[in-house]
Amino acid sequence: MSTKKRARAAAPHLLDQVDAPPAPPCTLVIFGASGDLTHRLLLPALYNLARAGSLDPGFRVIGVARRPMTDEQFREDLTSSLKERFAESGGEFDAKDDHVGVEAGKWAFLRERIHYLSADLGDPNAYTDLANLIASLDAAGAKKRKGDGDGHPTVTGNVIFYLAVAASLFDPTIQHLASSQLLKQSKNGWRRLIIEKPFGHDLASAKALDKTILKVLREDQVFRIDHFLGKETVQNIMVLRFANGFFEPLWNRQHIDHVQITASETVGVEGRGSFYDATGALRDMVPNHMFQLLAMCAMEAPNSFSADAVRSEKAKVVQAIRALPLREAAADTVRGRYLAGSVQGKRVKDYRDEKDVARDSDTETYVAMKLMIDNWRWADVPFYVRTGKALATRRTEIAIRFKQVPYALFREVLKQRPEVTLPSNELILHVQPEEGVSTNFQAKVPGQQMAISGVKMNFRYADYFQAEPNTGYETLIYDCMTGDATLFQRADNIEGGWAAVQPILDAWQKGYGAMVDYKAGSDGPAAADELLIRDGRRWRDLG
Ligand code: BG6
């Protein structure tokens, strides 16, 4: 029995995921093929696409990295890596069923379509080698197909270049691709570029990178990744808001008191010290991932679900985030750094003792901030955002806190128990690790006396839908192959994000906003609590 059938038999009440038809044939060139991203996310995502039948027989991968390797060695390396990933329980591929494993036939389909090129990306000859390899694989595919009829159909000239390399290599690689004519589209095929984060280091560098890119590519050829957009629950925010009648009328300053957006991580810097120490929590998470959550939650309804309509609405709302003068920017933000502690029973070093982190580092591993969105819908509704590493709990969520009801009707009931106040209603969009939506409201406690108590309603994805192993990159790679840019960042989305955090970066750089410490394994610095307390509010408990 196939894994899918087995899973279905075990949970017949669940709804199946809808598999997409195969995307058009193309060659996916991955720069940075020996790296962590390729092994941890891209390869499993490609395998999942193969498993779901979403890859055309004319699909092909060329991995490019410096290390000398043959095609066969590369395939072997990927085979063991894939098996390891799928064996990990609780990882990205743990679909909470015992049916997940590497299916030999599906992997063979992908494996034989994988090739390798050893190259130094700074060397112009590498690009000639790449062009030759693409052409020779095309020719071999065409010949095989003609000869025995059961070879791979020839790929068209469709090529995706995936930059899974250090950000310092983005600019030179794009320039080399352009000068070796590899970005030139023809009637025989399109050329597309996927570019990973970090997209720039601040507003000026993001603009400079966009300038380089848009000199040699059209905007519709560029796919700037923010992997949060590949998360089902993030995409679901649009469906929740715009495919249901009862949320949207309440979704505004009339009814909403404030919004809390949280991405709390238990991981520390995990061997990425040199990247992280030069980046920090603000740059790493806020203008990109946190603003995706904010934009999905705060944007106006687009006219359609076309890529440009959705991205225009997202750009508008991010551009409406109020830019604050230096002093206020610092007063409305908290920057923290973790000290040694213990996270879920595991000892964690002081951030400054982590490998590749400077002893005198001034980099934050936690940031909390209050943002105001200056538009008609959100005027005076604060959006509180917090994210940090080495915290007690792993949780990403958006909490919408509604305004309190007038107390008049229950004044007498509450008078008898002065310690009780009527809490406001909350709608929580759970992004990870639980995926779902929950809400709380007040109900009468059964009995002769009128007493009120908070209760909860909970929707969990897992209760309704058959979970397929998913890294989030499946959708993004598939969408790039089909040319759908809805879930990718347009230049103005990226620049809007940087523009909104630039005043904070400037304030910190000028010495405003002192660093505060928090213990690894805690909920973050006390100053983050103060940020809300001074407004008469408090963060949601993450425990
Ligand atoms: C990455 C950041 O972009 O996103 C990491 O560089 C962070 O520091 C990660 O841990 C969070 O993504 P996820 O999908 O694990 O929540």
Image: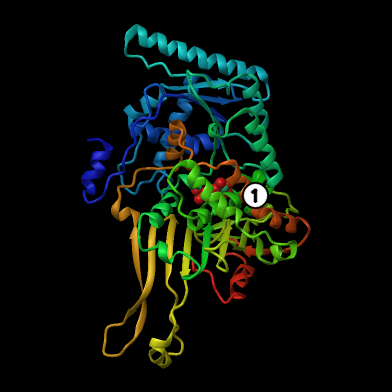
Q: Check the image and tell me how it is coloured.
A: rainbow
**In the drawing, does residue 97 fall left or right of residue 542?**
left
- Whole-percent x, y for residue 388 in the image: 58, 57
| Along the viewing direction, whichever of 134 and 205 lies nearer the viewer | 205
Query: On the rendered structure, is 509 left or right of 254?
Result: right
Give the image location of residue 167, x and y in percent: 64, 37
Residue under the image location 40 percent in, 33 percent down = 47
Q: Residue at x 34, y 49 (%)?
A: 96
- Mark 1 residue's CB less than 8 Å from ligand 1: no
Viewer-nearest residue: 310 or 443: 310
Split into 4 quadrants, where in the image is the N terminus?
Answer: top left
- From the viewer's perspective, is residue 229 above or below residue 383? above
Badge 1 crowding class, 10 Å Cα cut-off, few under 14, some 14 to 19, many 20 or more, is many
Please tell me which residue lies in front, 164 or 239.
239
130 left or right of 415 in image? right
Residue 397 rendering spot, x and y as whole percentages = 47, 59
Q: Residue furthest top?
A: 147
Can the viewer see residue 34?
no
Classify residue 529 by image quadrant.
Answer: bottom right
Amino acid type indicated by mark 1:
Trp
User: Where is 32 relative to 420, above or below?
Assistant: above
Q: In the orientation shown, which residue stands out farthest toward the right?
A: 510
The x and y percentages for residue 459 are 34, 60
- In the rendered image, which residue does mark 1 sit on? 498
Q: Secondary structure at mark 1?
A: helix
